[in-house]
Image (cartoon, grey):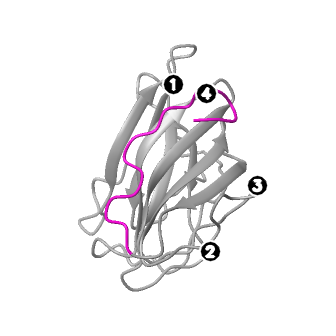
């Protein structure tokens, strides 16, 4: 999305096409705020701006989820999944994505970023490094549920695959 910035470090790990409308959903990580004020980046989401990005190295970085039109000409919706501010080597990445009728499920790994938790999380406390699952509305404007998954030590990979079975289960 920002190919002209040599410091831009974007990771794309998961892609799914919605068979109903042809929209392409993508998940990964980014180290910059994506400008969303005007076409083709006129998207709104749960969180569009995080302070502390320097756009220079791989960190800090947070999960990013977005959807684009099937022909790739318009960024329809975008959200950053992270706290309001990041710094240093803080890192979280979305490795997995799955669609249900009304929801977008993402899964990934966080080493040292406290991600927003909501909806009675199974585990609301991040340890050294934990996997996570977050569930957004299809327009990426609402975070419905989020939880960490992991033990008391450092987990190495987090959630690398996910499959939505319904709007409320995976």
**Residue in the image at 69% along x and 59% along y:** 121
Residue 23's disc is: 1
Q: Main secondary structure of the magenta part?
A: loop
Quarter of the image holding residue 2? Answer: bottom left
Inspect the magenta stretch and tell me whether residue 155 lies in it. yes
Is residue 27 among the parts visible in the rendering? Answer: no
Q: Earlier in the sequence, mark 2 or mark 3?
A: 2
Across and down, in percent, residue 112 comes to 45, 78
Across and down, in percent, residue 142 comes to 72, 48
* Circle 3 or circle 1, nearest the eye: 3
Kindly state the secondary structure of the residue where label 4 is placed: loop
- Label 1 packing within 10 angstroms: few (<14), some (14-19), many (20+): some
Residue marked by disc 3: 119
**Residue in the image at 64% along x and 55% along y:** 146
Across and down, in percent, residue 56 comes to 29, 76
Residue marked by disc 4: 100
Q: Earlier in the sequence, mark 1 or mark 2?
A: 1
**Residue in the image at 66% along x and 23% along y:** 101
Give the extent of the magenta segment: 154-170
Q: How many marks?
A: 4
């Amino acid at each position: 999305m920002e190919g002209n910035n040599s410091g831009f470090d974007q990771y794309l790990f998961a892609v799914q096409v919605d068979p109903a409308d042809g929209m392409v959903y993508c998940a990964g990580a980014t180290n910059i705020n994506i400008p969303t004020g005007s076409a083709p980046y006129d998207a709104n989401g749960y969180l569009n701006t995080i302070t502390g990005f320097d756009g220079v190295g791989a960190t800090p970085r947070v999960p990013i989820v977005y959807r684009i039109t099937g022909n790739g000409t318009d960024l329809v919706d975008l959200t950053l999944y992270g706290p309001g501010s990041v710094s240093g080597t803080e890192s979280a990445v979305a490795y997995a994505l799955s669609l249900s009728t009304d929801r977008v499920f993402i899964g990934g790994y966080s080493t040292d970023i406290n991600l927003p938790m909501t909806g009675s999380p199974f585990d609301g406390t991040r340890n050294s490094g934990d996997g996570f699952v977050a569930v957004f509305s299809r327009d990426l404007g609402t975070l419905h549920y989020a939880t960490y998954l992991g033990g008391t030590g450092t987990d190495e990979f987090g959630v690398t695959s996910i499959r939505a079975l319904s709007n409320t289960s995976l």
